[in-house]
Image (cartoon, rainbow, N blue to C red):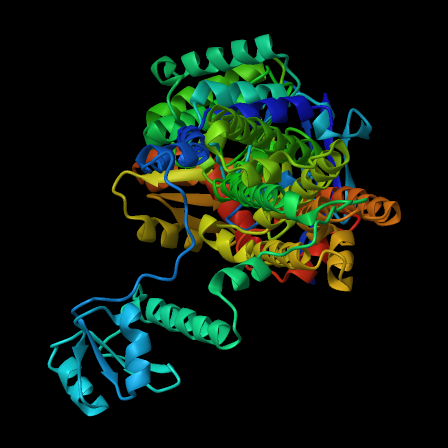
Amino acid sequence: MKHFATVFNYELKTQLTKKAGIVTMIVMIIIALVGTSVPRIIALFDKPAEPGTPTEITAPAPEVDSAIGYVVTDEDAARLLAPAIGENPKLYDSRDALVKAIEAEEVELGFVIDQSLNYEAIFKDRSMYEERDTHFGNALTHIKKEQMILSHGLTVDDFNAIENQSAQGQVTILGKNSGNNYLLSFVLMLVVYMVVLMYGNTVSSIIAREKDSRTMEILITSTRPSSLILGKVAAAGVAAVLQFGLVVLAAYIGFQMNKSTYPEIVIMMVSGSLSSSYLLTYLFFSFFGFILYLFLYAALGSTVSKMEDLGSATALVQFLFIFSYVMASIAAQTPNSTLAVVASVIPFSAIMVMPMRAGLVSVPWSQLILAGGLMLVAVAFFAFLSIKIYRWGSLNYGNKTKLTRIVKEALRPDIR
Amino acid sequence: MKLEVKDIKKSFGEKEILHGVSFEVVSGRAMGFLGRNGAGKSTTIRCLMDVFRQDSGQFLLDGQPFRPWEMRIGYLPEERGMYQKNDVLGQLTYFAMLRGANRADAARTAHYWIDYFSLGDFKKKKLETLSKGNQQKIQIAQSFLNEPDILILDEPFSGLDPVNAQVFKDTIAQFVKEGKLVIFSSHQMSYVEEVCDDVTLIHEGNILLTGDLKQIKQAEGRDKLLITPMNGELGALQDKLTAAFPTLVITQDRGSLIVDTQGKAMQAELLSWFAQDGTALRRFGLYEPSLADIFIQKVGETA
C-alpha cells in the first residue's frame, strides 16, 4: 500500500483531464440543466387560460366531421343521435354502402349505429393517433346515460349531485408514502445505474489497456498489485463522485431555479418525505455497491489480453448489474415481496434494490444491518480477489481462460 | 554487491522450463545473459523480478534473499509498453515515484533522461505521437530512472537502430563504470561481446557456461591455431595437414582453418612444417573464438 497515493493521484488526474470525459460531463450538465427547465420551457409555449371564464362540465362535442359517414337504421336512435352527429351528417342506407364509400375514400371513417346506440366504427386504415371513434363512443355513452337518468324520473343535475358525493377522509402514514418517494428513488437508481456502467467500464478498460500495451509488467515490478488496484478503483470512485456530483448539482440548481413552474405533485414527490435515514441508506448501499462493481470490472479487465476481448469479458458483470436493475424495478412495484427482500440483502443487487425499498417502505433494521454487513464483506472479498486476478493477469497473455480456472489459479499461494 | 542465482527451477503446467539455473553477477561488471529464443532468459529474469515465482531455488543479494521491490532497480521487460495516450514526462515521473522517489526527485530524473536521449521537445506529448524509435528511447529511459543500483534489461537492443544502440551501449558502460550491477539478456552476440565482462549461456533451461568472457574465450581457444592460406584454398591445405598430422582436428571457418593442436608442442612442430613446406600464409596465430562461435559450439554440443 506504499504507493497507493501515487497510483491514486496519477489515475485521478488522468481521468479528470481526459478530453472525452470532460466533454461527456459538460453534455450531462447541460442535459441536467435543460431537463430540469422543461416545465418552464413548456410554460413559455402554453397559452394561459383566459381569466374569469368558468370551466363547465359538458357532454363530449358532437362529431360533425364531413369525413365521417353514418348508417342509422332505427328512427328513435336517429333522433337521439342528433347532438352527436351534427345537423347534416353524411348518411348511408346500409353498412355495405358505407363500406363502399370508405373504400372509395368518399369518407375516412364510418359508424354503423344500432337501436341500442351501440356502434361499429369502420376504417380503411387507422392511424396510430386516431381518436375520433373514441370521442364518438364517449358521446353515445353520454346520451345513453342521459336517457337512463331521465327514464328513472331524475334530472341530469340530480345525477351529478349524487355523483359528486364523497366521504371526507384523512390519511395518517406512520411509515413512508411510496407515492411521494417513488420518483426520487427511481431517479437516484438511474444515477447509480449510469455511474456504475460508466466508471466500471472505465476501470476495466484502463486495466485491459495496460495489459494490451504491456505496461503492466513495468507496474507490477515497480509496486505491489494491491496499491495498483486499490489506487485505480479509488481514483475511479472519486472521479465518479466529483463528476456526477457536478451533474447532480446542476440538476439541483436547475430544479431550484424552475421550481415555481413545477406541478405541486412533482415538488412533493421530489422533496416530499426525503429523510436523512433514506439518504444515508442510499449513500451507503450505492457507494459500497459501486465500489464492489468497480472491483469486479477491474478483475475482469485483468483477464483479457486484447482490448477487443474486453466486451465479452465484462458481459458477466453487465448481466449481473442489469439483473440488479430488474430486481430494483420489481422492488419498486412490490417492495416487501420475498423476492425484493432477498434481492435487497444480496450485495450485487442490494446496490439498487435496498435504496429503492428504503425509499418506498420502512425496511426493518435487521435487514439493513444484514445487507450492510454482507455488502462490506463482499467489497473486502472482491477487493482481495481482484488484486489476485490482476496479479494473475500480469502473468497470462494470449489464451482465453475460464473464469473458474482464473479464480482457482489466482488464489494459488505462489502468486504474490 | 553480488547477486547469486541459485538452482532456479520453474515449470508451467507439466513442462519444466528452467532446470536448475545458477550464475552470479557482481557490481561493476556487466553480465550478458545469452540464449536462443525460448531458451529461458526472460523466464529467469521474470523470476528474478518476482513477476513469476520460481518452483525452487533462490535469488540472493550479498547472501540475503533478493527482494526486488525493496531495491532501486531499473527494469526493462522484454515486452515493452507504456501508456500510449499519456504524456511522456507525466508517466516517467509516475514510474519514478512508484519506485520510491518523491515528486521532486521523480520529476528531476524524468527530465534528465528525456533530455539525455534528446527528446526534450516531446516531454508534454502523448507517447503515441512519437516515432517508434523515440518511443523505444523513452521505454529505455524508464529503466534508467531513479539512479538504479541494479539494471536488469531483457533484450534491450531489440529493435534499436545502430545509432540508438551505440547511445545505449555507452549508457550501460557508464553504469558499469559507476559500479552498478548490470544484467542484460540478448541473443545478439556482438552487442554482448562489446559491452559485457561476464556471460552466462542458457539453452533449453540449462546453463551451458558462465563466467568471465575473456577467460571463456581463452579457454575455448586453448591449443587452437587460426591459419589462413594466402591462396584461400582451404580444402587443399586441410588435406595436406591431415596427411602430415593425422591426430590434428581441423575445421574450416570463414576463410580460415582452425586447428586444434591438443598441446603446445604440436604448435611449434606445425610452424616448422609450414616453413619447410613453403605454403604462403596470410595468418598463423592463436585462435580466439568469438562469442557467436562459442555459442554455436556449445549449443551444438547439446544437440
**Direction from residue B144 to residue B159 in the image, left or right:** left
Q: Quadrant of residue A267?
A: top right
> For the point 43% across and 50% down, which residue is it?
B251
Q: Is residue B285 visible?
A: no
Horizontal and vertical percent position of residue A263 = 50, 38
Q: How many marks?
A: 0
Q: Residue furthest front?
A: A153
Given residues A229 and B191, the one toward you in this image is A229
Position of the N terminus of chain A, as image quadrant, is top right
Q: Position of residue B175 (x, y in %)?
A: 56, 16
Q: Quadrant of residue B106?
A: top right
The residue at 48%/64% (across/down) is A156
**Vertical placement of B287 versus A169: above or below?**
above
Q: B5 or A104, which lies in front?
A: A104
In the rendered image, the vertical position of residue B89 relative to residue B244, given as above or below:
above
In this rendering, the answer to whether B5 lies above or below A145 is above
Residue A91: image x %, image y %? 18, 80
Q: Residue furthest right?
A: A366
Residue A8, image x and y in percent? 62, 26
Q: Residue placed at 70% from the left, 63% from the top?
A: B14
Which part of the image, by quadrant, shows the C terminus of chain A? top right
Query: In this rendering, would B153 be left or right of B3?
Result: left
- B96 over B129 or under it: above or below: above
> A155 or A331: nearer the eye?
A155
Left/right placement of residue B302 relative to residue A257 reads: right
Residue drawn at (32%, 48%) of the image: B234
Residue A173 in view here = yes
